[in-house]
Image (cartoon, grey):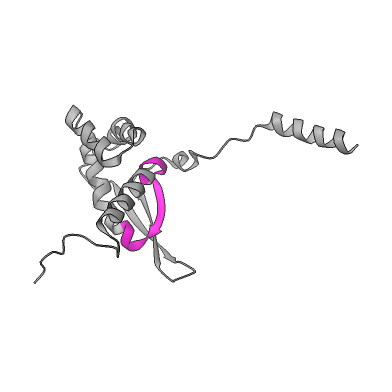
Amino acid sequence: MRHGLVNKKLNRTSEHRKALLKNMLNSLIKYEQIKTTLPKAKFLKPQADKIITLGKKDTLHNTKMLVSQLQDVKSANKVKKTLSKRYENRKGGYTRIIKAGFRYGDNAPMAIIEFVDRDVEAKRVDKKKKDTSTEKNKVEEKQLATG
C-alpha cells in the first residue's frame, strides 16, 4: 500500500525541506534558471508551476498567498508583474527540467530547472557591471605610486 507517500522527503526534516523549497523557489524566480540535483528539481517543478498559476489571477488573496509562500516581496512582485504576463496564454508547464550529467564529488545526478521562454538576462541580476572610468583611475594611481 502507498500510505503516506505524498511527496519526496529528500532525507531532511520537514522544516529543512520547507526552507529548502522556499529558497529554491526564490532563486528560480530571481534567476529563471538554477542547477540542482535531479530529485530536488523534480520536487521543485510542481511547486513552481503552482506559484505561477497563483500569480496569474490578480486578487488580493492570491497576492497574500504568494508573499506568505515565498517570504519575499520582490519575488512575489516579479511573479505578479513579469512571469504571469509572460505565461497568460499558457495553461501549464511553465518549467522544464534538463538533465545535466553527474556531480564530480558524489556522482549525484544533476539537472537544470528553468522557466520555458525564460529571460536570458535574468542570470546576470547580481553581477556588477564594470565601470571603465574607475578602472582607469586605479591603473593611473598604481603607475604614479610605483613610478
Q: Nearer the viewer, residue 112 or 135?
A: 135
- Total numbered badges shown on the rendered structure: 0
Q: Nearer the viewer, residue 19 or 138?
A: 19
> Residue at (27%, 38%) from the top-left corner?
87
In-image side of 28 versus 87 (left or right): right
In-image side of 103 versus 98 (left or right): right
Residue 98 at least partly seen: yes
Q: Nearer the viewer, residue 89 or 96?
A: 96
From the top left corner, tell me how far across and down residue 116 is, in percent.
33, 46
In-image side of 132 versus 53 (left or right): right
Q: Nearer the viewer, residue 8 or 116?
A: 8
> Residue at (50%, 41%) from the top-left corner?
124
Which quadrant is the C terminus positioned in?
Answer: top right
Residue 62 lies in what quarter of the image? top left
Residue 115 at least partly seen: no
Q: Which residues are magenta?
A: 28-41
| Residue 36 part of the magenta-drawn span | yes
Which quadrant is the N terminus positioned in?
Answer: bottom left
Q: Is residue 1 above or below residue 66?
A: below
Q: Residue furthest right?
A: 147
From the top left corner, tell me how far across and down residue 112 is, in percent.
39, 56
From the top left corner, tell me how far across and down residue 103 is, in percent.
45, 66
Residue 53 lies in what quarter of the image? top left
From the top left corner, tell me how far across and down residue 91 is, in percent.
20, 42
Q: Is residue 121 above or below residue 99?
A: above
Residue 97 lies in what quarter of the image? bottom left
> Residue at (63%, 35%) from the top-left corner?
130
| Residue 64 part of the magenta-drawn span | no
